[in-house]
């Protein structure tokens, strides 16, 4: 099984990346939350991958962190009616911390706002994954031009800081999806060592 791929980023869109390795170009399906973290075209990048084998195709899916890849696998293997395409859509709308938070808290409304995800599917996500949320890790992969490294904040895991920042914006009246998007952008702008307070201030435009 191909668990990761590292090479030159030849091209990228919000949902696809082409990675050149040993003279071959690999097309990797990615969520928007991973595309947001990709380096410039021509730089070295590493994605954590899962291959889905079908009778008529072999499709490669890639993610910024092993935790995101494992949660993607968790959804498609455990939630009735959720296949790779729908799982990728869900992970494109919400970052992993907010997705896990919505599932653990039973926030059907937030989950149902993902494109193509109705109330029934959102309910299945909660029912079938609530007990499993938290099983994945919390290491955040940081992409930089010319290199690919994995880095975890020394004091507080990145997922925890993002989750706390989103919750803080919720208390200020922000909807979960809007708060998640603002904090994700703040995290990309400030880098992996930003504190929860810094993420909140950046998300608020301070």
Image (cartoon, rainbow, N blue to C red):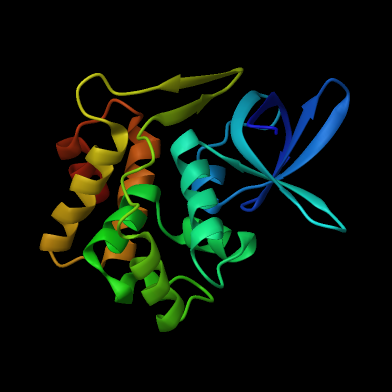
Locate residue 169: give its quadrant.
bottom left
Give the camera-side residue of 194 and 6: 6
* Horizontal and vertical percent position of residue 111: 37, 70
Position of residue 101 relative to residue 127, above or below, is above
Q: Residue at x 33, y 64 (%)?
A: 177
In the current view of this chain or complex, which residue is farthest to the bottom? 119
Q: Decide if residue 24 is on the left or right side of residue 83.
A: right
Position of residue 72 relative to residue 128, above or below, is above
Q: Residue at x 52, y 51 (%)?
A: 72
Position of residue 134 relative to residue 155, above or below, is below
Q: Residue at x 24, y 39 (%)?
A: 160
Location of the C terminus (image quadrant): top left
Q: Decide if residue 90 is on the left or right side of residue 84.
A: left
Instruction: Report the label total.
Output: 0
In the current view of this chain or complex, which residue is farthest to the left? 171
Q: Residue at x 39, y 49 (%)?
A: 96
* Horizontal and vertical percent position of residue 67: 44, 39
Position of residue 173 relative to residue 35, above or below, is below
Locate residue 18: give its quadrant.
top right
Q: Decide if residue 180 is on the left or right side of residue 195.
A: right
* Horizontal and vertical percent position of residue 195: 20, 32
* Horizontal and vertical percent position of residue 128: 39, 65
Give the camera-side residue of 98 and 184: 98
Give the camera-side residue of 60 and 196: 60
Location of the N terminus (image quadrant): top right
Q: Can residue 159 be seen in the rendering of this structure?
A: yes
Q: Can residue 205 be seen in the rendering of this structure?
A: no
């Amino acid at each position: 099984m191909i668990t990761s791929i590292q090479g030159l980023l030849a091209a990228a869109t919000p949902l696809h990346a082409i990675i050149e390795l040993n003279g071959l170009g690999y097309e990797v399906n990615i969520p928007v939350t991973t595309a947001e973290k990709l380096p410039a075209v021509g730089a070295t990048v590493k994605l954590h991958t899962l291959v889905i084998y079908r009778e008529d195709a072999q499709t490669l899916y890639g993610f910024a962190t092993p935790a995101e890849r494992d949660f993607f696998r968790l959804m498609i293997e455990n939630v009735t009616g959720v296949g790779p395409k729908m799982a990728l859509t869900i992970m494109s709308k919400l970052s992993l911390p907010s997705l896990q938070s919505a599932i653990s808290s039973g926030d059907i409304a937030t989950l149902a706002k993902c494109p193509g995800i109705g109330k029934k599917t959102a309910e299945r996500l909660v029912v079938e994954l609530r007990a499993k949320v938290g099983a994945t890790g919390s290491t955040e992969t940081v992409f930089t031009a010319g290199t690919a490294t994995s880095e975890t904040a020394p004091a507080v895991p990145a997922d925890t800081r993002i989750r706390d920042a989103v919750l803080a914006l919720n208390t200020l009246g922000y909807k979960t999806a809007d708060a998640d998007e603002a904090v994700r952008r703040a995290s990309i702008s400030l880098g992996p060592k930003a504190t929860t307070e810094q993420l909140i201030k950046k998300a608020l435009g301070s």
